[in-house]
Amino acid sequence: MAKPQIAIVGAGFAGLAAARQLCRLSHQEADIHLFDRNASTTMLPALPDVAGGRLEPARIRADLRKLLKPRIQLHLGTVQSVDPAGKKLSTAEGVFTYDFLVLTCGAVADRRGLKEHQAAAYTLGSLADAERISQDFGAFVQSRSSPQAVVVGGGYTGLELASNLKMRSVRLGRPARVTVLEMKDRILAGLPERIRSYLEAQALRQGLEICTGVKVDSFDGRNVRLSDGSCHEEVFLCWSTGTRRGLPELQGEKQELPDGRIVVDEYLRIPQHPQIFVAGDAAAIHHRDVPLRKAVNFAYYSGQTAGRNILLGLRGRPLQAFRPVDLGWVIPFGSTAAGQVLGIDYLTGRLPLAMHYAMCGYRNFTLGNKLYFAGIAVRSLFGRL
Ligand SMILES: Cc1cc2nc3c(=O)[nH]c(=O)nc-3n(C[C@H](O)[C@H](O)[C@H](O)COP(=O)(O)OP(=O)(O)OC[C@H]3O[C@@H](n4cnc5c(N)ncnc54)[C@H](O)[C@@H]3O)c2cc1C
């Protein structure tokens, strides 16, 4: 009898964790295929540091071929669509037939709110984005007497990016005017108020300008016109209004959140297509009635559970429900940070910053980069960043 074919789409935290679990299957039990559009994987939480020129891209990137066990077959290319009825997925190279599928394709920057000149705006969803910002912002600042950057979106990614741009311009000796635009009445609106106001105060202290209650009316590739009638001219525009699930297109019936996350059951299966599991940022995993936030640890453990459940299913054993453990979150901001960690609901300063970099090390992919981030964590604890 032919061996079952297991396909994993996306080699990020969730996909790699699923692949590692599935490696516990013997060669006789199944073939494992991992698809990714890139030949490397990325520690996304450190993207703002790369965008701000504080970190070399190599510190957050790892070559997939070196990471994977030989029995995992790597297919490079974008998976365009999945047909659950025919159990097929399509890439530019052709069609692949699977028996089980794990969708771990993460999320992409959501540019839908920007109607014109999308190519002239910068997003921060991938390492290529971060490298582009780093390169172009350096050149932009050097070529202007009064450089100005506008970051649209006052969430944590927008704030971190704005802070990194500001610091970069100061290091280059050309302090830029950096404005954060937010359409709600305050930045970081979803956060607990104490943490929100701490980070807002840090942003103002760093010299960021914060404009709330405004929307972008138009962008002509250079100038941004706002809903209050004002205009920012000759700007470096960054668009940071959240993320959504990108390709592959998933045909057939399913339930999705507005950002495209696919609703799964407690075993991480799509209820309408039980041979498809979804994990990480692509999945809407409800925990205490709300979807889990997009985070590295949830991606890692949900990927692991999806892989384990395929393994259990193939062996005819009962599946295990995914029970997330929330250790908390941290928002790094320059030489400080704020967050809720291990039940402490207000933690600010160097300790959470060190925790953030420690996490970037712990979940990094190569020993060299793990140690490098451990060094950053120690330095940030002692204020030596
Ligand atoms: C700027 C930024 C800062 C963040 N900061 C933090 C933080 O401080 N702490 C935290 O916990 N989380 C943070 N996150 C969120 C965290 O990075 C994600 O939750 C996590 O990466 C999700 O893992 P994943 O495996 O689901 O997806 P990803 O890590 O995004 O991996 C998805 C993989 O799928 C591949 N892929 C996608 N589509 C296709 C396709 N169609 N075909 C083939 N391959 C495909 C991609 O190339 C990628 O390798 C941050 C994210 C960003 C963008």
Image (cartoon, grey):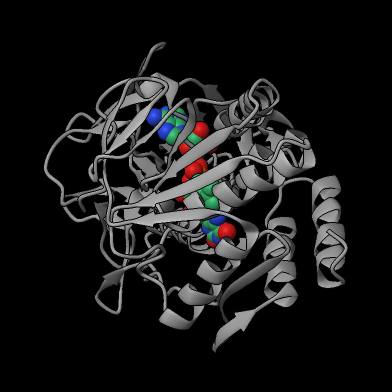
Q: Residue at x 27, y 72 (%)?
A: 290
Residue 178 in view in this figure: yes
Residue farthest top in this picture:
93
> Considering only vertical position in the picture, is 352 above or below 52?
below
Residue 182: image location, x then y, percent: 35, 53
* Farthest bottom residue in view: 344
Q: Nearer the viewer, residue 221 or 147?
A: 147
Residue 312 horizontal side relative to residue 49, left or right: left
Residue 198 position within the rendered picture, expressed as x and y whole percent measured from the top left: 54, 75
The structure residue drawn at horizontal position 52% and vertical position 37%, both measured from the top left corner, is: 149
Q: Nearer the viewer, residue 230 or 277?
A: 230
Above or below — where is 221 with respect to 215?
A: above
Please tell me in which quadrant of the rendered image residue 99 appears: top left
Residue 19 percent coordinates (x, y): 55, 45
What's the residue at 15%, 47% (across, down)? 254
Where residue 16 appears, x then y in whole percent? 57, 46
Q: Nearer the viewer, residue 127 or 155?
A: 155
Nearer to me, 28 or 309: 309
334 w.r.t. 322: above or below: above
Question: Is residue 296 visible to us here?
Answer: no
- Side of 325 where 332 appears, left or right: right
Could you tell me which quadrant the N terminus lies in?
top left
Q: Is residue 216 left or right of residue 169?
A: left
Q: Quadrant of the C terminus?
A: bottom right
Report the label total.
0
Instruction: Establish if 111 lies above or below 144.
Output: below
